[in-house]
Image (cartoon, rainbow, N blue to C red):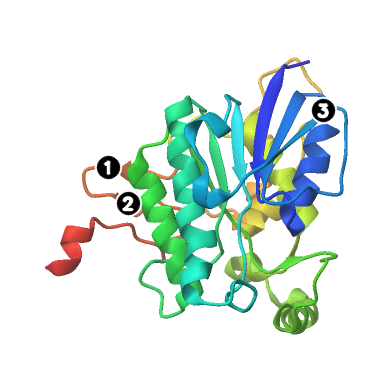
Amino acid sequence: MSMRAAIVVGATGLTGSSLVEQLCNNNEYVSVTVIARRKPTFTHPKLEVKICDFDQIEEQDIEFAHELYCCLGTTIKKAGSREMFEKVDFEYPLAIASLAKKRGIPHFIVITAMGANENSPFYYNRVKGKLEHDLVELGLQRLSIIRPSLLVGDRDEFRLGEKVGEKLLKFAHPLLIGPFKRSRAIDASQVAKAMIIIALYGKQQSVTIYSSDELATCEYPEASEDTISREVLFNWDKLHEGEKVNRDVVINRDKYKLEETVIDKEVHFRHRDQEKK
């Protein structure tokens, strides 16, 4: 058994709460620390809760861990304004990632969105794309970007738009095949499970992006003494139906862009100076 420690921010949300429970019940982890503005209802002997104002979070608030899972996210309606939305969905994750780097935490795992793109016509996706760009620019030791589709599960709050979207996607589920698989709604508990599997068995490269269809097929490998390959974790044959795909995300840090071998070709990270040309 490993002696791993994890930190979770955004632990009271739909995915974050499931992630904390799964981490505490995972034998690989002996310590799980939640940094939150309010205390979660879940308790466990492995769990430590630190109540913190993210506007005032400092380096000493974050101790060393093997992974820092960032599940922070809100809606404009709940935040009250675009300014507050960007604070939760952009400023806080970026500040926490910077502190994690200073603390020497080797792996930062963050949830963004399926359509994240800083040039998107949709405001929500632009903010998520901007976050991804700046996290890459930070030069973290290892960054895993989680891009789920519509998250489903039992929320504490009622969101009409998401409920309507959930029903529509459920109806359209059989029609979403091939490249449209990534648009299928995904259970938040499955996303949480996939994040842990990625932490334990994912590729040891500087930046990796995981699409929603990959997350949906992510399962724990069977116990074996043999080296666990990435092919065990994801059923690539079903995902790409025989198509030969380079699944590595290649980062050109001089230009801060994703090369053509990126998983999601719609997203392009570019140096901000290039936008003026």
Q: Quadrant of residue 113?
A: bottom right
Q: Which mark is residue 253?
A: 1
> From the viewer's perspective, is 197 left or right of 39?
left
| Residue at (64% x, 38% y) in the render | 198
The tag earlier along the polypeptide, 2 or 3, is 3
Q: Are marks 1 and 3 in contact (CB under 8 Å)?
A: no
Q: Which mark is residue 241?
A: none
Label 2's element?
loop
Say which amino acid is labelled 1: Arg
- Label 2 and label 3: CA atoms lie apart by 41 Å
| Residue at (53% x, 61% y) in the render | 89
Say which amino acid is labelled 2: Glu
Say which of 186 and 265 sits in front.
Answer: 186
The tag earlier along the polypeptide, 1 or 3, is 3
| Residue at (59% x, 71% y) in the render | 79
> From the viewer's perspective, is 163 left or right of 274?
right
Query: Looking at the image, is 67 positioned above or below residue 180?
Result: above
Say which amino acid is labelled 3: Lys
Q: Quadrant of the N terminus?
A: top right
Residue that numbered label 2 is attached to: 259
Is residue 247 visible in the rendered image? The answer is no
> Horizontal and vertical percent for residue 99?
46, 36
